[in-house]
Image: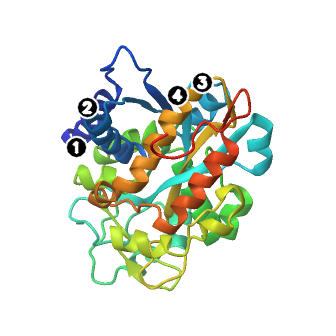
């Protein structure tokens, strides 16, 4: 299991190198920072975009909180967050936001003898695990959800994010919808006061690594980290009471309910969506950019990158079990770029993909 943890970290390091090495001395690199949830797909897109255009993206996978801080400080061209900012926060900091990918947050476990998708949990049991009310894997509440599955009396070790994280926001948003006690005592945010003193890992990478080497562990990560590193994940009961496994199909079912066109500022959280085949903890990632920038060429390069990803990135998203933004939403997002992202003279920095 230690090898799995090292594999996760090696994957992250290799991806950082793949998108961060500068190739051109003449053109400034695009810079971004934030979400580890979106890091695998950004790395894949950046590699393909580099091959296609020669333009380079330097992205720091430091968590949504770090991404918000860096774009507010104007030290990067865009931040990436899995928690949308409120209209007030956007206005306060002169920012605009738009979604660029959707995917699933999954529960990974380290329970010898239990295979992928063999164990089912529901929202109430999950909340009680992280509240410290369920402490053993053979607890009656878990056993009731898994008749016929032999569960050990192993202590549960909860693994959480140690950094400010949009993955944590979406996970705790789901728990708040599942448990009035959780909502009252803990709530939802990028960082919360966890009721149980468990293990803390930095980034999706850190949570995956800790869970993979800790017997009895449970943690929450973006699905690509579980998929690429052969980690054991659970099923979940969804809003319709169906036990579903994480997959591109179940994420897409949940994402189909997302009404981006009528969401002010694209502020839409899509956990606990209806549908017999919907994954309960489906999430989105937003790019944050300055509305008025003195680096207009950099901003245009970033928008060209995302326009290219919207048009060409779906097969790569599918391969990593992300859900690409729906085609009808793309013009709405691109119109928001023209209206909201301007140079110091007030002129839009982007007027179309070939601009």
> Can I make out residue 299 in this image?
yes
Cα gap from disc 2 to disc 3, whole angstroms = 29 Å
Give the residue at x 49% y 37%: 302
Q: How many residues crowd mark 1 within 10 Å: few (<14), some (14–19), many (20+)?
A: some
Cα gap from disc 4 to disc 2, whole angstroms = 25 Å
Q: Are marks 4 and 2 in contact (CB under 8 Å)?
A: no
**Horizontal and vertical percent for residue 91?**
79, 42
Q: Residue 340 or 346: which is nearer the viewer?
A: 346
Q: Residue 130 or 234: which is nearer the viewer?
A: 234
Instruction: Classify residue 8 as left or right of residue 79.
Output: left
Specify how the rendered protein is coloured: rainbow
Cα gap from disc 2 to disc 1, whole angstroms = 15 Å
Give the residue at x 54% y 44%: 197
Q: Secondary structure at mark 4?
A: helix
Cα gap from disc 3 to disc 1, whole angstroms = 41 Å
Residue on which disc 4 sits: 298
Cα gap from disc 4 to disc 3, whole angstroms = 5 Å
Q: Earlier in the sequence, mark 2 or mark 1?
A: 1
**Horizontal and vertical percent for residue 186?**
68, 55
Q: Earlier in the sequence, mark 3 or mark 1?
A: 1
Q: Nearer the viewer, mark 2 or mark 3?
A: 3
Instruction: Classify residue 13 as left or right of residue 136.
Output: left
Q: Is residue 154 above or below residue 53?
A: below
Q: Earlier in the sequence, mark 4 or mark 2?
A: 2
Q: How many residues crowd mark 2 within 10 Å: few (<14), some (14–19), many (20+)?
A: few
Q: Earlier in the sequence, mark 2 or mark 3?
A: 2
Mark sitting on residue 4: 1
Q: Earlier in the sequence, mark 4 or mark 1?
A: 1
Give the residue at x 29% y 54%: 316
Residue on which disc 2 sits: 14
């Amino acid at each position: 299991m230690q090898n799995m943890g090292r594999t996760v970290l090696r994957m992250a390091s290799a991806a950082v190198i793949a998108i961060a090495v500068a190739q051109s001395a003449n053109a400034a690199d695009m810079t971004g920072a934030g979400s580890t949830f979106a890091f695998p797909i950004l790395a894949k897109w950046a590699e393909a975009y580099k091959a296609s255009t020669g333009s380079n993206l330097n992205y720091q996978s430091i968590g949504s909180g770090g991404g918000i801080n860096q774009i507010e400080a104007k030290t990067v061209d865009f931040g990436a967050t899995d928690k949308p900012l409120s209209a007030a926060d956007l206005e306060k900091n002169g920012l605009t936001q738009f979604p660029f990918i959707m995917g699933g947050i999954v529960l990974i476990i380290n329970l010898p003898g239990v295979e992928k998708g063999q164990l089912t949990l529901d929202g109430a049991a999950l909340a009680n695990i992280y509240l410290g009310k369920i402490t053993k894997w053979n607890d009656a509440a878990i056993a009731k959800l898994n008749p016929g599955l032999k569960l050990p009396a192993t202590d549960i070790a909860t693994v959480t994010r140690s950094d400010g994280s949009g993955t944590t926001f979406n996970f705790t948003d789901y728990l708040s919808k599942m448990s009035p006690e959780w909502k009252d005592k803990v709530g939802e945010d990028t960082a919360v006061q966890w009721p149980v003193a468990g293990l803390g890992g930095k980034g999706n990478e850190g949570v995956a690594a800790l869970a993979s080497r800790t017997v009895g562990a449970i943690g929450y990560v973006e699905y690509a980290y579980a998929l690429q590193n052969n980690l054991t994940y659970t099923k979940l009961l969804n809003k319709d009471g169906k036990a579903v496994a994480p997959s591109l199909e179940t994420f897409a079912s949940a994402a189909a309910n997302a009404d981006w066109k009528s969401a002010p500022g694209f502020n839409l959280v899509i956990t606990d969506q209806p549908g017999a085949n919907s994954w309960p903890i489906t999430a989105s990632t937003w790019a944050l950019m300055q509305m008025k920038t003195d680096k207009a060429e950099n901003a245009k390069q970033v928008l060209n990158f995302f326009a290219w990803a919207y048009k060409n990135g779906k097969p790569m998203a599918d391969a990593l079990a992300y859900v690409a933004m729906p085609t009808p939403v793309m013009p709405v997002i691109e119109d928001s770029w023209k209206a909201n992202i301007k140079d110091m003279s007030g002129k839009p920095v982007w007027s179309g993909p070939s601009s």
